[in-house]
Image (tube, grey):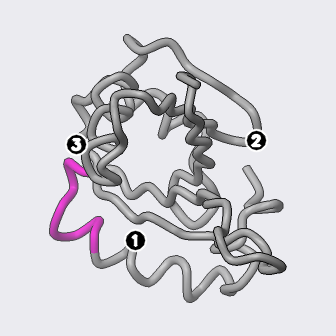
Protein backbone atom coordinates (compact mmCIF):
# COMPACT_ATOMS: atom_id res chain seq x y z
CA UNK A 1 0.00 0.00 0.00
CA UNK A 2 1.31 3.44 -0.78
CA UNK A 3 0.88 6.31 1.62
CA UNK A 4 -0.55 8.51 -1.16
CA UNK A 5 -3.28 10.69 0.23
CA UNK A 6 -2.00 10.48 3.78
CA UNK A 7 -0.38 13.63 5.12
CA UNK A 8 1.87 11.83 7.62
CA UNK A 9 3.23 9.57 4.89
CA UNK A 10 3.72 12.37 2.36
CA UNK A 11 5.50 14.71 4.77
CA UNK A 12 8.19 12.24 5.80
CA UNK A 13 10.57 10.10 3.80
CA UNK A 14 10.39 6.32 4.18
CA UNK A 15 13.53 6.04 6.34
CA UNK A 16 12.15 8.59 8.80
CA UNK A 17 8.80 6.76 8.94
CA UNK A 18 10.56 3.41 9.53
CA UNK A 19 12.55 4.62 12.56
CA UNK A 20 9.68 4.48 15.09
CA UNK A 21 8.47 1.16 13.67
CA UNK A 22 11.93 -0.37 14.14
CA UNK A 23 11.98 0.72 17.80
CA UNK A 24 8.44 -0.51 18.37
CA UNK A 25 9.11 -3.83 16.64
CA UNK A 26 11.87 -4.69 19.08
CA UNK A 27 10.15 -3.72 22.32
CA UNK A 28 6.47 -4.24 21.55
CA UNK A 29 6.29 -7.11 19.10
CA UNK A 30 2.64 -7.85 20.01
CA UNK A 31 1.45 -4.32 19.06
CA UNK A 32 0.41 -2.88 15.68
CA UNK A 33 1.49 0.70 14.89
CA UNK A 34 -1.44 2.69 13.48
CA UNK A 35 -1.57 6.30 12.25
CA UNK A 36 -5.07 7.78 11.99
CA UNK A 37 -5.62 11.06 10.19
CA UNK A 38 -8.77 13.02 10.79
CA UNK A 39 -10.16 16.42 9.90
CA UNK A 40 -11.97 18.67 12.33
CA UNK A 41 -14.17 21.42 10.95
CA UNK A 42 -12.72 24.73 12.09
CA UNK A 43 -15.05 27.08 13.93
CA UNK A 44 -12.99 30.16 13.01
CA UNK A 45 -14.55 31.96 10.00
CA UNK A 46 -12.33 31.89 6.92
CA UNK A 47 -9.97 29.26 8.31
CA UNK A 48 -9.66 25.87 6.67
CA UNK A 49 -10.19 22.54 8.37
CA UNK A 50 -7.66 21.38 10.96
CA UNK A 51 -5.95 18.06 10.16
CA UNK A 52 -4.71 15.89 13.02
CA UNK A 53 -2.75 12.65 13.30
CA UNK A 54 -3.42 10.16 16.05
CA UNK A 55 -0.74 7.53 16.60
CA UNK A 56 -1.65 4.35 18.46
CA UNK A 57 -0.18 0.96 19.31
CA UNK A 58 -3.00 -1.56 19.01
CA UNK A 59 -2.81 -5.08 20.49
CA UNK A 60 -2.73 -7.78 17.81
CA UNK A 61 -5.63 -9.66 19.39
CA UNK A 62 -8.05 -6.71 19.00
CA UNK A 63 -10.89 -6.95 16.54
CA UNK A 64 -11.77 -3.99 14.33
CA UNK A 65 -14.65 -3.23 16.71
CA UNK A 66 -12.28 -3.15 19.71
CA UNK A 67 -9.99 -0.84 17.75
CA UNK A 68 -12.90 1.48 16.89
CA UNK A 69 -13.98 1.62 20.54
CA UNK A 70 -10.40 2.38 21.65
CA UNK A 71 -10.28 5.28 19.16
CA UNK A 72 -13.69 6.56 20.37
CA UNK A 73 -12.38 6.54 23.95
CA UNK A 74 -9.09 8.21 23.00
CA UNK A 75 -10.77 11.12 21.17
CA UNK A 76 -13.63 11.28 23.70
CA UNK A 77 -16.35 10.98 21.06
CA UNK A 78 -19.85 11.58 22.37
CA UNK A 79 -22.74 9.11 22.11
CA UNK A 80 -24.35 11.27 19.41
CA UNK A 81 -21.29 11.08 17.14
CA UNK A 82 -20.83 8.42 14.51
CA UNK A 83 -17.28 7.22 13.86
CA UNK A 84 -16.08 5.60 10.63
CA UNK A 85 -12.52 4.32 10.21
CA UNK A 86 -11.20 3.67 6.71
CA UNK A 87 -8.06 1.70 5.92
CA UNK A 88 -6.20 1.79 2.60
CA UNK A 89 -8.37 4.44 1.04
CA UNK A 90 -12.08 3.83 1.59
CA UNK A 91 -12.05 0.25 2.89
CA UNK A 92 -14.35 -0.51 5.85
CA UNK A 93 -14.20 -3.79 7.75
CA UNK A 94 -16.59 -5.95 9.73
CA UNK A 95 -16.27 -5.46 13.47
CA UNK A 96 -15.23 -9.08 13.99
CA UNK A 97 -12.22 -8.91 11.63
CA UNK A 98 -8.92 -9.32 13.57
CA UNK A 99 -6.56 -6.33 13.49
CA UNK A 100 -3.61 -8.66 12.89
CA UNK A 101 -5.20 -9.80 9.62
CA UNK A 102 -6.00 -6.22 8.55
CA UNK A 103 -2.42 -5.17 9.35
CA UNK A 104 -0.89 -8.08 7.43
CA UNK A 105 -2.82 -7.24 4.26
CA UNK A 106 -2.96 -3.42 4.38
CA UNK A 107 0.23 -2.20 6.09
CA UNK A 108 2.45 0.26 4.21
CA UNK A 109 6.02 -0.48 3.17
CA UNK A 110 7.24 1.30 6.32
CA UNK A 111 5.39 -1.20 8.56
CA UNK A 112 2.65 1.19 9.70
CA UNK A 113 -1.09 0.82 9.15
CA UNK A 114 -2.49 4.12 7.85
CA UNK A 115 -6.13 4.95 8.43
CA UNK A 116 -8.53 7.86 7.97
CA UNK A 117 -11.31 8.74 10.37
CA UNK A 118 -14.62 10.52 9.83
CA UNK A 119 -16.60 11.77 12.82
CA UNK A 120 -20.14 13.04 12.22
CA UNK A 121 -23.10 13.99 14.38
CA UNK A 122 -25.98 11.72 13.50
CA UNK A 123 -28.59 13.26 15.81
CA UNK A 124 -29.90 16.70 14.87
Magenta stretch containing residue 26, yes or no?
A: yes
Dot 2 or dot 3: first in sequence order is 3
Q: Secondary structure at mark 1?
A: helix
The Cα atoms of the two marked residues, 1 and 3, are separated by 15 Å
Q: What residue is rendered at 35% in x and 22% in y?
A: 65
Mark 2, Cα crowd under 10 Å, few <14 / some 14-19 / many 20+, is some
Question: Of 12 and 21, which appears nearest the observer?
Answer: 12
Disc 3 target residue:
59
Q: Secondary structure at mark 3?
A: strand
Give yes or no for contact between labels 2 and 3 (Cβ–Cβ under 8 Å). no
Residues rendered magenta in the picture: 24-31
The Cα atoms of the two marked residues, 2 and 1, are separated by 21 Å
Q: Position of residue 118 (x, y in %)?
A: 61, 42
Quadrant including the C terminus: top right
Dot 2 or dot 1: first in sequence order is 1
Q: Of circles 2 and 3, which is in front?
A: 2
Disc 1 target residue:
21
Amino acid sequence: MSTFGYIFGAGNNEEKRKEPEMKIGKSKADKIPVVIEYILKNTVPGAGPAIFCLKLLVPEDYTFFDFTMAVRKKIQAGAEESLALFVNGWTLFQGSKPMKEIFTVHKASDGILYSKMVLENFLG
